[in-house]
Image (cartoon, grey):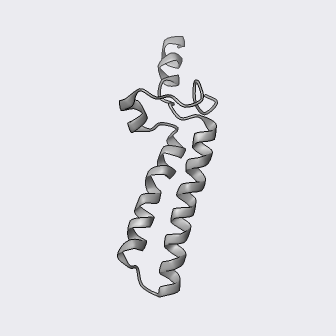
């Protein structure tokens, strides 16, 4: 069981401050894209792109793992996200 727990900690490479920042950035992108599409009555290209760009920071925030950080070998805030 200790070997499994050791491997599970390696799945987190984003620290708590990085996760909070990604949450607010992704939430802001999603909020502004959706509010502007509601106000205009239709979805323009930049609104759709803004909402799609919000998916990446929100998903990495939820998972606690960033594939680009993994490729580069970066771990933010030590062990990451309090795991």
* 66 sits left or right of 22 in the view: left
Quadrant of image for the C terminus? top right
Q: Residue at x 63, y 37 (%)?
A: 16
Name of the residue lying farthest toward the top: 2
Q: Residue at x 47, y 19 (%)?
A: 7
Q: Quadrant of residue 53?
A: bottom left
Instruction: Tell me: residue 37, above or below residue 14.
Output: below
Of 71 and 5, nearer the camera is 71
Of 8 and 26, nearer the camera is 26
Task: Count the numbered circles shown.
Answer: 0
Where is residue 18 drawn, in percent x and y? 58, 41
Where is residue 55 drawn, in percent x and y? 45, 56
Where is residue 14 drawn, in percent x and y? 53, 35
Q: Quadrant of residue 42?
A: bottom left
Of 83 and 2, nearer the camera is 83
Q: Residue at x 59, y 24 (%)?
A: 78
Instruction: Tell me: residue 40, above or below residue 71.
Output: below
Q: Residue at x 38, y 79 (%)?
A: 44
């Amino acid at each position: 069981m200790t070997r499994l727990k050791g491997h599970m900690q390696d799945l987190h490479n984003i620290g708590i401050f990085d996760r909070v920042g990604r949450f607010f950035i992704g939430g802001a992108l999603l909020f502004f894209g959706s509010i502007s599409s509601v106000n205009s009555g239709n979805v323009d290209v930049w609104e759709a792109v803004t909402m799609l760009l919000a998916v990446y920071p929100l998903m990495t925030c939820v998972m606690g793992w960033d594939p680009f950080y993994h490729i580069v070998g970066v771990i933010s805030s030590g062990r990451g996200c309090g795991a």
